[in-house]
Image: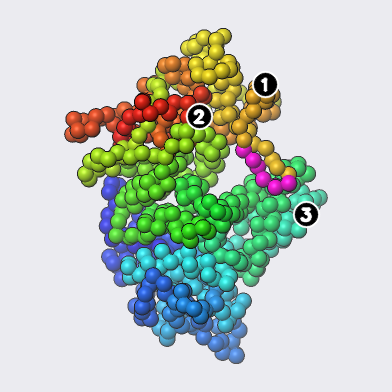
Amino acid sequence: MGVRQSVDAGPMHSNDKPSPVESTLTAVSPLGGPDTMNTPISALPYPPLGDPTCQTRLIRFDPVTESLSTDTAPIRCRLIVVNLRASVRHEYHALSYCWGGMSETSPIHVNGHIHYITTNLEAALRRAREIDRDQLIWADALCINQQDLIEKASQVDLMASIFTEASCCLFWLGNTADDPGDGRHAILEADAKKAFSLIESLAHDEHYTRRGNREEVSLGPLMKLQWWHRIWTVQEAILPQYCVAMCGPLTLPWVLFTRASANFRRHHYKRCCNRAVSSLKEFHSKIQELEDTRRELISDGGTNMNRIFQKFQDRHATDPRDKVFGLLALGATRSSGLTIAASLGADYSANSHEIFTRTALKLIKQTGLLDLLPRAREYDRNPHLPSWVPDWAAKNDRHRIREFLTWSCWDLHNASAGRKAEFSDYIIPSTDILGLAGVRVDSIAVVGNSCEDPEAFMPQPESSMFVNFPDRQWWRLVVKTVSVDGKYALGSGSYKEAFMRVLTLNYIDDYDMLENRVIRRRIAPGEVAACLREIQSPSQRQTYFQSKMINHRFFITKTGLLGMGPVDVVPGDEVFVLLGGNMPFILRKTTLPIYASQVGSFHTLVGDAYVHGIMDGEYVDESKKLLVHLV
């Protein structure tokens, strides 16, 4: 929802845009930052907000002339100011939508003035008026003065209240058209009808692989619509109590979407419907991540903002700062009613480097946890960011996020023995150096081949066996490096068992039929032999390796510890347990000569790791604690 006033440190990301103050022909999108609009926008005289921290504007449609129908009559409306904290509150519907192409605009009448908005928003307002012309509507592009940076920031901070208190949220997925173009904001009406029909049938617990049913392919165009892929629609889908999805002339209660997703999961795990096209799986994945976050939000424990930032990193935003601002409203907990990142707020006067660093530091200090240090591999990471700060603007597709979430098993481990993060009292001025307390475990002696190429997991045409798995090379490395006939370097058990637990990250997934969900748990001692057989089974090898090993590398430390870490790990990197982290971390020594005499050694973060034998606090020793400086 932001406007750029300052230039980001370092090279601009591809989704950075110039400030709207640079041109009078620019519209600014709360759902995607500033974009250039070809049609001039009138200076809309907004009714002033007395207190923008609790007041907002709502849209009231003017009556439609009897000679015109609601689907063809021009949109005429007025903006009224309301106080969300007043004792007598207005009932309204909030509109969740994507702005659409800024070069395609339509005129509407607002407070007696002609005002240009995107064609996608105009279609959404027209559909909302058809549903109930007397209902007040909240839509960000009209209800927020996009040229007022202070108002814009205060309204972003008010988003949680706006969407939570709406009597209904209308999800405008997109329009229907004879020619949907690139399919980002419109689809064929026939596809929309088939997709909605399939969702209804799944919601009523029908089998989706019944004879002659090919409706699941119609979900592809529906899931391509940009509503599913923008960062701002996440909180808009999670916060409201009641929601309705709209696509062109079609409407369907959102609860049917969630019920359809849950039924799909049950049918899939029961294997009564084991054929599912990718679009159906994507539908389930998108709904599930929203509903899982909603359940977190209303739980006593509230949401884990670190995980939310990671889970939705693949969502798009034109302004990179909105990758943070667009999710802050989800930090609310039922017990406190406040955001865990309440002190953050939207600040469009700061650049993305500052926002990402500030957000990461405050989350670490407020929670005492290092959950945001583990993250999916960032291929186009901003090199100017500190290594410990996530680059939430980095392009991470859905597959990389899934790989990371599969790899991430920090809830099952407790490497720092439940200790909260401890910070350095000595802060170097004007730097982004993070001082943390931890224990150095060991340095890495040798590394194996990487699991980086997804093609390595494709079966050969002439055989059902999968080839190019690196585990055989890894085991030969173990045999060559340590004495495998003896006990493992730490604790009890053999090297063969330790190797198996490293390959599986020491967890398995069970499906709970009663709760209709997957439960992740550690591998019990009596299950080791069965897991070894399963890993060696041709039918299961691909599942284990493709889900857990992609973009990771096996390593052995100098004292014989076995582990799995980032694909970038090299001999000489060091294994640390940092207080506040459930997983060990791989760090790499670096030098900053100007500060060397003041502080000592510095490290960059390579990533988190599974290291067998130190996952339950075995290495947390107060006498060995030292200060680690991450740059």
Q: Position of residue 298 (x, y in %)?
A: 56, 57
Could you give the CA–CA distance between mark 2 and mark 3, rounded to whole angstroms?
Answer: 44 Å
Can residue 364 be seen here? The reply is yes
Residue 515 among magenta residues: yes
Residue 210 among magenta residues: no
Could you give the CA–CA distance between mark 1 and mark 3, rounded to whole angstroms?
Answer: 39 Å
Extent of the magenta region:
514-520
Q: Secondary structure at mark 1?
A: helix
Q: Position of residue 266 (x, y in %)?
A: 72, 47
Circles 2 and 3, Cβ within 8 Å, touching? The answer is no
Could you give the CA–CA distance between mark 1 and mark 2, rounded to whole angstroms?
Answer: 21 Å
Query: In the rendered view, would you say 346 is above or below 44?
Result: above
Question: Which label was assigned to residue 153?
Answer: none
Who's the residue at 45% across and 69% down the image?
140
- Please, which residue is most extreme toward the bottom here? 66
Circles 1 and 2, Cβ within 8 Å, touching? The answer is no
Question: Which label was assigned to residue 615?
Answer: 2
Task: Name the N-terminal-most of marks 1 and 2.
Answer: 1
The quadrant where residue 223 appears = bottom right
Q: Amino acid at mark 3?
A: Glu
Q: Which residue is mark 3?
A: 206
Would residue 405 appear left or right of 203 to someone viewing this image? Answer: left
Q: Position of residue 249 (x, y in %)?
A: 64, 71
Q: Which residue is mark 1?
A: 529
Who's the residue at 47% across and 37% down the image?
418
Can residue 583 be seen here? The reply is no
Would residue 30 appear left or right of 524 to someone viewing this image? Answer: left
